[in-house]
Image: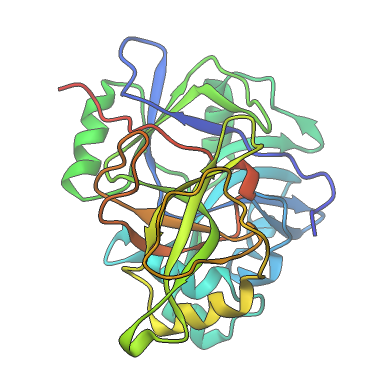
Amino acid sequence: MAAAHFIAPMKATSGPLPMGDGWATELKWDGMRIQIRCREGRVTLTSGSGRDVTGSFPELAGLATELGTDTVLDAEAVVFDRGRPSFSRLQNRIHVTSPTPLLIAAHPIVAIVFDLLEVDDRSLLELPYRERRRLLVDLVEPGPSWNVPVHSEDDPTVLFTFAEARDLEGVVCKRLDSPYRAGIRSADWVKVKIRKRQEFVVGGWLPGSGGLTGTIGSLLVGVYDTAATELQLAGAVGSGLDDVERSHLTRLLVPGPCPFGAPIGPFDRDPQWVDPTIVVEVEYSIWAPGKSLWHPVYRGRRIDREPTEVIREESGQPER
């Protein structure tokens, strides 16, 4: 269920590192997009797709009191593992609506707050990013479960090299003079990934063999064309699926007609088609145009993406 007054998040395009003046660079966080609304001392959280997830992250309840003013923040919910964001550990939290104290202690959430959208019912969307960033830093002090990320207006290769050396996901470069374009995938924000990884929509599965007979062997995944009218098959992914996740997916996937416009085949086993409602994240080595994914590895389900928003993201490695 979508929350009232939800502001659709601005999204980045994929591309190479932008050069020249007028850009700021932040680290890209391997987490789940959330919107934080603080009003009258209470916190309401929504996913990037507008779903109410307030109960999932009780660690953030104290942020409204800490700020002392009504605000809307754009953020990423992250679980860290030895100082690095861990999407696999995040999976233990994002599908739980009422986490136990034990689960919270084992996989604590940190909100990485990177934009300020409203203050005291005043919209800041038309302000340039540079000004929104200044107001954000003045408003949000680091807390036990929230922080404002590193920000640099210097050469973007410096922060990219830092991320690369620590095997982080990448960086996001933002035009300093850009407004917040709600609901738009804009070239004013450019994400540059170190690892080849993106979201895919599950459109079917192939039965397993041997010890996996009778269950999911691999998922058939795809992306929508730019008009969001046709789901295009990208390949099959089985590596990274464990028995627990196979069990979850078996319950979640609903049988349906083939959702793909032009399936790649033939398959060595009869595909089982499903309604294209589940979004997953997959890492891969190569994805040539017109070809299937090479060496794909399943990383987890996402609840902050709408299936029809999932399109192919071109690799944006920096020029060296």
Q: Is residue 136 left or right of residue 23?
A: right
Q: Residue at x 14, y 22 (%)?
A: 320
Please state the total of marks drawn on the protein image. 0
Q: Is residue 65 left or right of residue 290?
A: right
| Residue nearest the viewer, comparing 45 with 268 | 268
If the image is split into quadrants, where does the N terminus sit?
A: bottom right
Residue 108 shows in the view:
no
Residue farthest to the right, as pictured: 4
Is residue 318 shown above or below 8? above
Residue 262 shows in the view:
yes
| Residue nearest the viewer, comparing 155 with 282 | 282
Residue farthest to the top, as pictured: 20
Q: Residue at x 79, y 38 (%)?
A: 120
Q: What x and y, as percent, mark residue 26?
A: 38, 35
Q: Residue at x 47, y 86 (%)?
A: 214
Q: What x and y, as percent, mark residue 105?
A: 46, 80
Q: What x and y, as percent, mark residue 52?
A: 73, 61
Q: Residue at x 48, y 75 (%)?
A: 92
Colouring of the image: rainbow
